[in-house]
Image (cartoon, rainbow, N blue to C red):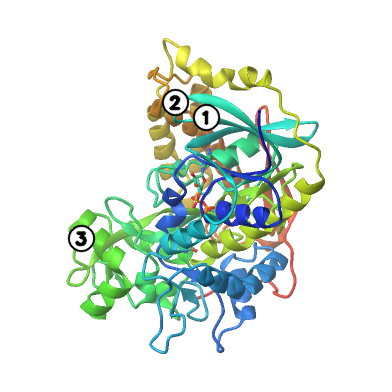
Amino acid sequence: MLKHDVVVVGAGLAGQRAALAAIEAGRDVAIVSKLHPLRSHSGAAQGGINAAVGKEDSVDTHVYDTVKGSDYLGDQDAIELFCREAGPTVVEMEHFGTIFSRAPDGSLARRPFGGAGFPRTIYAADRTGLALLQALWEHLGTARFTLYEEWALTSLIVRDGRVQGIVALDRRKGDFAQIGAKAVILATGPFGRVYGRTTNAHSCTGDGVSAAYAAGAALKDMEFVQFHPTALMETAILITEGARGEGGILKNANEERFMSRYAPHVLELASRDVVSRAILTEVLEGRGFPDGSVHLELMHLGKEKVESRLQEICDFARSFAGIDPVTQPIPVYPAQHYMMGGVGTDSHGATNLRGLYAAGEAACVSIHGANRLGGNSLLETLVFGRFAGEAAAAYAESAAAPEVHDADLDASTAPWRAWSSRSDGEDPSTLRTEMQATMDRYVGIYRNEADLLEGLRRIRALKERAKNLRVVDQSRVYNVNLTDALETAHMIALAEVIVVGAYARTESRGAHSRTDYPKRDDARWMKHTVAVRAAEGPQLSYSPVAYTRWEPKERVY
Ligand SMILES: Cc1cc2nc3c(=O)[nH]c(=O)nc-3n(C[C@H](O)[C@H](O)[C@H](O)COP(=O)(O)OP(=O)(O)OC[C@H]3O[C@@H](n4cnc5c(N)ncnc54)[C@H](O)[C@@H]3O)c2cc1C
């Protein structure tokens, strides 16, 4: 029987940082990852990581910007802790070997980002995530731990009210296996693939969040879905906010710099929900280009700046859109980008299930509230990854050995194995495509009651059909058909929670924008949504938002 003190599921920045902390605390640690660690979505992060490090900037301003950006739904105690840890976290990553871009005087270069009162986004050109991920992976390489690479978590083992391990599919062999653990840390990252038009990698399917939900964990604020304003029109590949941070501007088909109507003070650098709604409004009101896009212009910045500060963007625009940003505008349109919601945790990663911790995009602490600021997520993975690793290690030190029985494996994996023995049933990729089309159409940037009800009806129908999934491919080694079926089932479960939460929340706050309830309603809705699984679907309840120093105000940029 495989057993460890702490099993970390996910090898992106959050998982690696959590593992490092648990190893440093002296525990026997394993990392389980369905991808090679360096293929994690963290490596796709472009624009940068926030930290108030200069003399002119302050931790308090970072806190205030984050609270305001969250539309007052972020927990202020957690945000204060988060922003205080930012400087030391970035310095630590530099000491681990991250090569950040520099200002002419040799200090860390910082660029302005949306919703930030000061340029505080530290970056490595437009490959910040990869620079951080490589440095952390190399650092982790000096430590002792077990890596289960290309193993995909399918469910959690819960016994006596305590999480005692995981069940996973070893994709290289095609076998399911159990790994016992005193503590499990979920760091399985984003689940943007619930949508069709998304900047997220194909692997971002929320398996860990779904497994936690199935095991009884409470999911928090799932209706808050961030749409990034600028993704390439055709492919939804991200064009970093750093492009606007470096001075890029948005124009409609009438050559107007339309952000002056929506955010007169900060224009393109308003927070993401504001800019995404502005673009959609321009297009819906007929001022978009014939392909339904608006234009992001970088030409005025000059070849030297565009090619040095935004190398990857140049490459993406040239390779995937046939556009040279040095001389041509880039057609862009919003795409799903980030999930503010996730497995509810306290600020040390603990969930409502004993022995279960979560960190990174899979978790909801909540510091992002109703809308995340760009650059705060990379920071979140490292700060709360470390805290979760420390807390899980401390718990595991005194926890009893996990109780996991070989005999249970067959029963717990029977439903998935049944998919391969059916002669008739639903094709996973068909269900996935229908789910994505439903979420794109009915649960997008602007929402209303009729659309959400229709979206829910369709997702529930897909949930029914998913009971009858069929895996045609009978091979064992790297069975992509089976992986696809598992991921699709996870995503349909999460899609239902998103729609139910969005339907219930009859107000507009941050990224959740209801045309039938266009105002923020603090009297009724200044609270977190908490969703727990029940036989008939997600059961919602609400929990209070933590306040320290910042009174809710109207949010203008
Ligand atoms: C294109 C893009 C650009 C971004 N740019 C920025 C930016 O500039 N600044 C910023 O702050 N944020 C940015 N973000 C957001 C940020 O990158 C992510 O929120 C963050 O990196 C997530 O890190 P993570 O460790 O939680 O998850 P990930 O890095 O996605 O790692 C998830 C890990 O979980 C593993 N996993 C998943 N499911 C399973 C399973 N079933 N079994 C085993 N392992 C599993 C995967 O193998 C992977 O190792 C960007 C996001 C995207 C998509």
Pick the front one: 252 or 97: 97
Mark 2 secondary-structure assignment = helix
In the image, which is nearer the foreground, mark 1 or mark 2? 1
Q: Please state the horizontal and vertical placement of residue 525, each as a whole percent of the image.
A: 68, 56
Rounded to the nearest whole Å, what is the CA distance between mark 2 and mark 3?
Answer: 35 Å
Q: Residue under label 3, please give it.
A: 318
Q: Residue under label 1, please give it.
A: 169
- Asked if the residue at label 3 sits under 8 Å from ligand 1, the reply is no
* Left or right, residue 518 beside residue 405: left
The answer to which image quadrant residue 438 occupies is top left
First in residue order: circle 1 vs circle 3: 1
Taking the spot 50% from the left edge, 69% from the top edge, the residue there is: 49
Disc on res. 65: none
Mark 3 secondary-structure assignment = helix
In the image, which is nearer the foreground, mark 2 or mark 3? 2
Disc on res. 482: 2
